Amino acid sequence: RPDLQVLVISRRDAEACRAKATALGLTYPIVVQKQWEVSLKYGMFATPIGYLIDEQGILLSDVAVGVESILALAGEPSPIELDALPTGKEPIWLK
C-alpha cells in the first residue's frame, strides 16, 4: 500500500539487524532499541507485532500479534512469502 509507511523496531544489535534486513531486501527504516525503550512505551514484548499509528504518534488500532494479524491490519489480503521479497536493496537506517 503506497499510503502505508513501515517502521521496524528491533532489539538486536545494529549489525545483526542490517545483515538480516539486507538478506531479506527490506528497504524501510529500522530502529534498534538498546534497553527496550519502545517496547516499554507500548507495553508489548512479543514479536512480530504491529500497530497503526498516525503522524502525531497516536495509536489508531489495537496491537496486531503475528504475521497474519499484521497483514490484515495493513490491509493485505494474504501472507507474504519472505522468499518473494525483493533483494539487493539497501535498507534505510535511522540513527
Image (tube, helix red, strand yellow):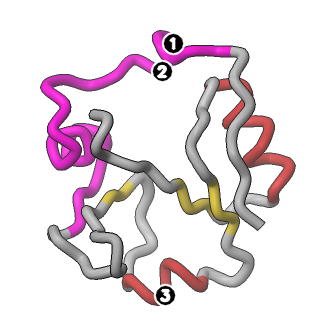
Secondary element at tag 3: helix
Q: Residue most toward the right? A: 15
Q: Residue 25: x and y, percent?
A: 63, 24
- Distance from Cα at disc 1 to Cα at disc 2: 4 Å
Q: Residue 61: x and y, percent?
A: 15, 68
Image vertical order of residue 85 relative to residue 55, above or below: above
Q: Residue flagged by tag 3: what amino acid is it?
A: Leu
Q: Residue most toward the top? A: 84
Callout 3: few (<14), some (14-19), or many (20+) C-alpha neighbours within 10 Å? few
Q: Residue flagged by tag 2: what amino acid is it?
A: Leu
- Asked whether the beta carbons under mark 3 and mark 1 sit within 8 Å of each other, the answer is no
Which residue, given by chain and number where applicable, does mark 2 sit on? 82
Q: Earlier in the sequence, mark 2 or mark 3?
A: 3
Q: Between residues 36 and 25, which one lies in front from this camera angle? A: 25
Q: Which mark is residue 83?
A: 1
Q: Between residues 91 and 84, which one lies in front from this camera angle? A: 91
The answer to whether residue 82 is magenta is: yes
Dividing the picture into quarters, in which one does residue 92 lie?
top right
- Distance from Cα at disc 2 to Cα at disc 3: 28 Å
Q: Which residue shows up at 23% across the image and 67% down it? A: 63
Magenta stretch bounds: 63-87
Q: Residue flagged by tag 1: what amino acid is it?
A: Asp
Q: Residue 31: x and y, percent?
A: 64, 63
Secondary element at tag 2: helix
Image vertical order of residue 80 relative to residue 46, above or below: above
Q: Residue 9: x and y, percent?
A: 56, 62
- Asked whether the beta carbons under mark 1 and mark 2 sit within 8 Å of each other, the answer is yes
